[in-house]
Image (cartoon, coloured by chain):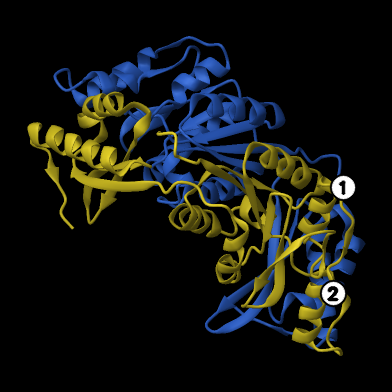
Chain colours: A blue, B yellow
């Protein structure tokens, strides 16, 4: 990587027994990883999925917070007894767990005086000093405290909020990528890919992923780099290697 | 939980840049969590997704190995340069990274003498003393060393192998679960659920998950317990509470 590159990293902390039990399939990790990379050049370096337990949330939020520029948590900021993310993050950073005035007013307006019950009020409580992340889908805001950003677990609501999160994140260098789909198996091109990886060293990342599509097997070769010229050069090198071995390349 | 309950826990370590970049959506976490729970009463307590980097694999495999009865890793045991799981796990446990005789013979037979190249031979290398997990889909076996089990990342191959893994795992107490789908929002039933959770304390876990289905919004209430009677009793309690509040319950 050249010196101009700013590497900005993020960790994702998924909070939820329903993901760990396998009952619910996570849909946020892939969305957030692509969104962070494509919009902001922020690379997700680690993901952890933990249960709705205060001790685990605190331990993992702090550890990811130390190791990354940002931590994004999903889940556990709703109104029910198992939603303990806001309280846990308050404890993690030794902040008071209190009503955020603006959040309180947003929710009061949304539910109306009569229906603004205690579970709904709970969604306005967060670590003292938090910045709000507005929620155009269902009002209850997310928040950012230190480098930790707390988002909801429901995918459609989370997706409605990321635009409002963008202003709080400083971007890194964009990572470019290209891919080549081939009709072959990994073990037939492993030596060639290793040679290409050695040639381009740390400037590009070459990954290879077997797939099964329309009854055919193949390998998808993915090349990633923050340097567009090296990326293109590496792409050409690999195409040449594949042609030399007479390996068919998928079009389109 | 009563004294007869044996709690057996597992951690899952997903190894792969393609999952962290968001390019590939993981399909193994949910499958393994459900399979472990339903077949063996083993509860997944934590999941981590890490890049194809030796240092990260070693650090996280050791940490999950200490905290759980078993660790299941997915990904990184193929033939290419970015497949470094077997070597990393060997280093983690200070074992030699060497050919496993039986694995070597399985692969030799599968590919034939002429096509058994170095990348394919690499798939027979693993930590010294490993037990094999046979692979009926594509020959290359997984392995178990200490309490760490290494499986491939391709979902269809992984699924073909779990039957052969079963014999190495000691089962825990089965966790039973029921769910109730309601036409409501979480904040309308949060107080009732909290009351039910307090009544059944540690004997059951009550979770609530909002959903959007066929244009309707609702909440799925999931009750989990290793004690079937308490589970049924808690289920009845919640149904009564919902009826009292005239909250509609989905049938079927």
Residue A87 in the image: x percent, y percent?
A: 45, 19
| Left or right of residue B76: residue A245 | right
Which residue is rendered at x = 34% and y = 28% of the image? A140
- Identify the image quadrant of the N terminus of chain B: top left
Q: Can residue A237 be seen from the camera position used here?
A: no
- Identify the image quadrant of the C terminus of chain B: bottom left
Camera-side residue of A161 and B43:
B43
Q: Tell me the element at label 2.
A: helix
| A101 up-or-down from A209: above or below | above
Q: Tell me the element at label 1.
A: loop
Camera-side residue of A225 and B202:
B202
Provide the residue designation for mark 1: B94
Which residue is rendered at x = 47% and y = 38% of the image? A163
Q: Quadrant of residue B104?
A: bottom right
Which residue is rendered at x = 51% and y = 40% of the image? B7
| A252 up-or-down from A230: above or below | below
Which residue is rendered at x = 30% and y = 44% of the image? B228
Q: Which mark is residue B234?
A: none
Q: Earlier in the sequence, mark 1 or mark 2?
A: 1
Residue B112 in the image: x percent, y percent?
A: 81, 89
| B131 up-or-down from A45: above or below | below
Density class for disc 1 (Cα within 10 Å; few <14, some 14-19, many ≥20) is few
Provide the residue designation for mark 2: B121
Q: Can residue B120 be seen from the camera position used here?
A: yes
| Left or right of residue B149: residue B163 | left
Seen as rendered, the residue at the extreme front is B4
From mark 1 to mark 2, how far is it between C-alphas? 22 Å
Q: Chain of mark 2?
A: B
Density class for disc 2 (Cα within 10 Å; few <14, some 14-19, many ≥20) is some
Proximity of marks 1 and 2: CB atoms separated by less than 8 Å: no
Residues indicated by labels 1 and 2 sit on the same polypeptide chain? yes
């Amino acid at each position: 990587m050249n010196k101009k590159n700013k590497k900005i990293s993020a960790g994702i902390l998924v909070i939820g027994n329903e993901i760990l039990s396998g009952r619910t399939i996570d849909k946020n990790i892939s969305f957030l990883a692509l969104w962070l990379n494509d919009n902001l050049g922020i690379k997700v370096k680690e993901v952890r999925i933990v249960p709705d337990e205060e001790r685990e949330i605190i331990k993992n939020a702090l550890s990811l917070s130390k190791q990354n520029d940002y931590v994004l948590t999903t889940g556990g900021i709703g109104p029910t007894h198992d939603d303990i993310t806001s309280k846990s993050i308050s404890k993690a950073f030794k902040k008071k767990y209190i009503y955020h005035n603006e959040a309180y007013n947003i929710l009061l307006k949304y539910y109306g005086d009569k229906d603004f019950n205690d579970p709904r009020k709970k969604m306005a409580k967060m670590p003292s000093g938090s910045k709000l992340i507005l929620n155009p889908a269902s009002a209850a805001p997310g928040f950012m405290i230190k480098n930790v950003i707390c988002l909801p677990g429901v995918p459609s609501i989370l997706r409605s909020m990321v635009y409002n999160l963008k202003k709080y994140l400083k971007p890194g260098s964009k990572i470019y990528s290209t891919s080549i789909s081939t009709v072959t198996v990994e073990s037939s091109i492993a030596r060639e890919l290793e040679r290409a990886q050695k040639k381009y060293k740390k400037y590009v990342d070459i990954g290879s992923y077997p797939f099964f599509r329309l009854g055919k097997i193949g390998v998808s070769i993915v090349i990633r780099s923050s340097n567009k010229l090296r990326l293109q050069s590496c792409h050409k090198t690999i195409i040449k290697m594949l042609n030399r071995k007479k390996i068919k390349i998928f079009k389109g």
